[in-house]
Amino acid sequence: MKKTALLLALTLMLSLGVSCSKNKDKSESESSSATSTTTSASDSSSISQSESQSQSQADKVENTTRNPLTGQTDYNEDAIGKRPVAVMINNLKGALPQYGIEQADILFEVLVEGGITRLMGVYADYTAVPDVCSVRSCRYYYPVIAMGFDAVYCHIGYEQTFAKAKLNSLGIDTISDSSVIPYSTMFAVDSERAQSYSSEHTKYLVGANIPQALEDYGYRTDLGDEYKGDYFVFEDEFFSPEGAEASNVNLKFSASYYSTFEYDESTKTYKKFHNGSEHIDGKSGNQLSYTNVIVLCTEVYPKPENTYLMEVEMVSSGTGYYISGGKAQEITWEKTSEEAQIDFFGPDGNPLTVNVGKCYIGVIDNNATITIE
């Protein structure tokens, strides 16, 4: 099945109504050569479709030796062609540090109610998921993202209206506190955290029990045919994409929550900061770091039916950035259905090529501020 590639039309003026328009502020200091890019993205209606030049997911080279989410070769060969696991992860300031988060192959961050963000870690090998803490509840757009990986979706609780309805309509395979498998089999309370954290910040997924849970549920472990192969188009030789300098990137999800990424030339990765502080995995003690940072701009706004909750348009298309190797490249993306994976396109309209390594994906409002310098 051929995908229709998206072309990005950029100008410097918001008044022209284009997507991810960009203002560059040159430093007044003679000693500084850095260029700062602040982005406020409007709706994606300006994206036009061209004749498809992209290869489809079915055309990708079959993956037989490496992690399909990162391209890394130090991978369990028995996990090739098997379904990944997606886990809801608490991101409240009072719940930090999380643990088991560093091992996620792809980490999503999306706004939820009250100006906070929530994370979803995707783990390619369901037999090697670590204990993950703290696990929180579902919002309706996360299982829609998880469906694009053919993932088993893990969560504790759900928002009682839209999320509950979406879980039911999708029929997605889940591991949750409402499952028929006893709660204590898949989730536990971290007794050490319980001494100083609120109870909702102490519950963790028992990763080692996932294989048995899938067997007990009778869940399929093989990937559907349309999901087989590498998730991205990987370039084995490290490269910096063509684009603006990107030593420091800031995604302002709301007035109170933002994520910052600082490029480390020695490791060729971006170190993640949570609201200005190093984002640390509580078990390893390591700061989260990513070879690839992807920003997806879409419509994010209060739901008309319940303005406390957020609407996040994931079955959509839009603009964004691919950030790696100290550079930021403008991209486009689309997700054509709830079941479809997200497709990423470079400036030429062809499938986006990325570096081998772990990936952070921030889904952010078109009108949010993105600063790249």
Image (cartoon, rainbow, N blue to C red):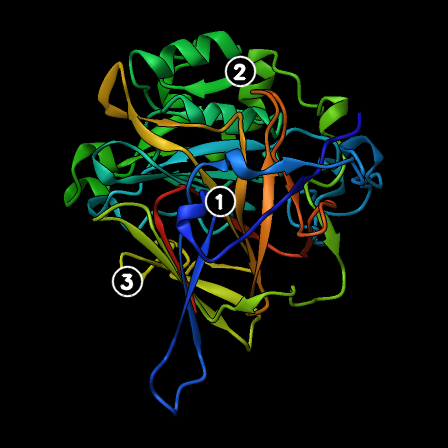
Q: Is residue 136 left or right of residue 172?
A: left
Q: In the rendered view, would you say 319 is above or below 156? A: below
Secondary structure beneath dot 3 equals strand
Q: What's the amino acid at mark 2?
A: Ile
CA neighbours of label 3 inside 10 A, class few (<14), some (14 to 19), many (20+)? few
Secondary structure beneath dot 1 equals loop
> What quarter of the picture does the C terminus occupy?
bottom left
Indicate which disc, 3 or 2, sits on the residue closer to the N terminus: 2
Residue name at image x 62 percent, y 56 percent: 357
Residue 277, numbered label: 3
Q: Position of residue 185 (x, y in %)?
A: 42, 22
The residue furthest bottom is: 31
The residue furthest front is: 16
The residue at which mark 2 appears reads as 172
Q: Is residue 341 left or right of residue 349?
A: left
Residue name at image x 47 percent, y 71 percent: 247
Q: What's the amino acid at mark 1?
A: Val
Q: Is residue 52 left or right of residue 263?
A: right
Q: What's the amino acid at mark 3?
A: Ser
Indicate which disc, 3 or 1, sits on the residue closer to the N terminus: 1
Q: Position of residue 192 (x, y in %)?
A: 23, 45
CA neighbours of label 1 inside 10 A, class few (<14), some (14 to 19), many (20+)? many
Residue name at image x 37 percent, y 12 percent: 164
Q: Work out whether residue 132 can be spotted.
A: yes
Measure how far apart labels 3 and 1 are at the Cα level: 34 Å
Of badges 3 and 1, the one in the foreground is 1
| Front position in the image: 191 or 56 | 56
Q: In the rendered view, would you say 161 is above or below 196? A: above
Residue name at image x 55 percent, y 12 percent: 217
The residue at which mark 1 appears reads as 18
Indicate which disc, 1 or 2, sits on the residue closer to the N terminus: 1
Q: In the rendered view, would you say 194 is above or below 269? A: above
